[in-house]
Image (cartoon, rainbow, N blue to C red):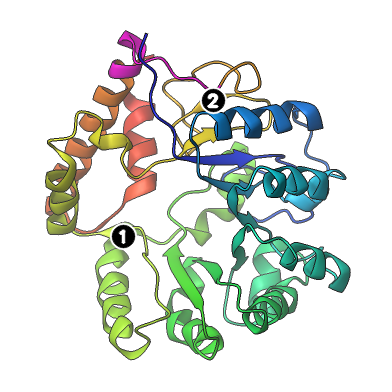
Amino acid sequence: MDYYRLNSLYIEVTHACNQHCRHCYLDGGIHKKVEEMSTEQIKHIFTEFKAQGGRYVIFTGGEPLMRSDVFELLDCLEALNLRFTFASNSLGMNKERLEKLASYHCLEEYFTSILGSTAEKHKAICGKDSFDAAINAVSFFDKKGIPTFVQATLCNDYIDDTEDILKLFSGFQNCSVKITPIASLGCKSETEKEENKNLIVPCECFGDFHKKLNELCEKYPNCVGDDNIYCHEQIKEMINEYRENPFYSLCWHSVCVRPNGDLSFSYNMINPCVFGKAYESIKIPMNEKFFEYIEALKKADEYILEKSLYGEVEYDTEVDNYLRSVPK
């Protein structure tokens, strides 16, 4: 049996969070109850991933600091010499934790998030005073020479905050900012979806947003990251670039592990195919199930390509929309 070669690992160690963002696709929160892997199970995954030739880990949640063993797990990555990105909303990042995280030679990037251009706007979406903590963390790691990545997710009322956000971070030496509009409300209850539907940026606004961001790329050339909004020509170019590769739909994805150990290729919550429990094995056999999944992703790409003929699309949301429509 042949197995798919794994290069990078995206692992959600928890879905618990010290915030409860109104749009969060995980529907996280401090009281979020979800099955989680043990410390030893996660260490086993890292060890097997390394043994298979894996090179890079994206360590995320939920909020990873909600786990009491977070630094024990990072110690394991360090011992295995596995490079990693650490993702946190920064709310729980005190000086001791920042110093500990910065001490890892394998830390390649610190990832954090904001939800508006001011502390007040940010708090209105997440309910917590984490805005200044995120900026302080970026400043701390910048002084240490460690790259940072900021995810700025904007609701409809804040969509014009783009340049103000770039101004906030443009002074740092090695900070990239990804700005994306809220395109869906994720795994929320129907009540919460109704209460928060005003956060969603209408797709007819994507074109103007995309155009403005492209213009700002010239003004802030070393700061603006990919925005997840694509026009028809961009999607066509992506597909053509990988079409000759039999696994082209997987070329830009990590293998993903959920807190309960579910192993898939999807960053999103709608997984058409789960390849067992990662703590049992992260080997993914290239069998009929594997190739059916690839075909589903290829069809999703074709669906998005056609939809993009009528205007810019938010790629991740459209993948979810397509997979929801496919009979299980």
User: What crowding class fits label 2: few (fewer than 14 Cα within 10 Å), some (14-19), or many (20 or more)?
Assistant: many
Q: How many marks?
A: 2
Q: Which residue sits at x=84%, y=43%?
A: 69
Q: Position of residue 5 (x, y in %)?
A: 39, 29
Cα–Cα gap, marks 1 and 2:
27 Å
At mark 2, the secondary structure is strand
Residue 283 lies in the magenta-colored region: yes
Residue 205 located left or right of residue 95: left
Within-10-Å neighbours for mark 1: few <14, some 14–19, many 20+:
many
Q: Is residue 142 magenta?
A: no
Residue 38 visible within the image: no
In the picture of the structure, the residue carrying the numbered disc 2 is 263
**Picture coordinates of residue 257, whole percent (x, y):** 58, 32
| Percent position of residue 68, x then y | 87, 45
| Quadrant occupied by the C terminus | top left
The residue where tag 1 is placed is: 229
* Residue nearest the viewer, comparing 198 with 265: 265
Of 182 and 65, nearer the camera is 65
- The residue that appears at 74% across and 70% down in the rendered structure is 130
Q: Main secondary structure of the magenta part?
A: loop
Can you say which quadrant of the picture contains the N terminus?
top left
Residues drawn in magenta: 282-291
Q: Percent from the top left, x then y, of residue 87?
A: 64, 57
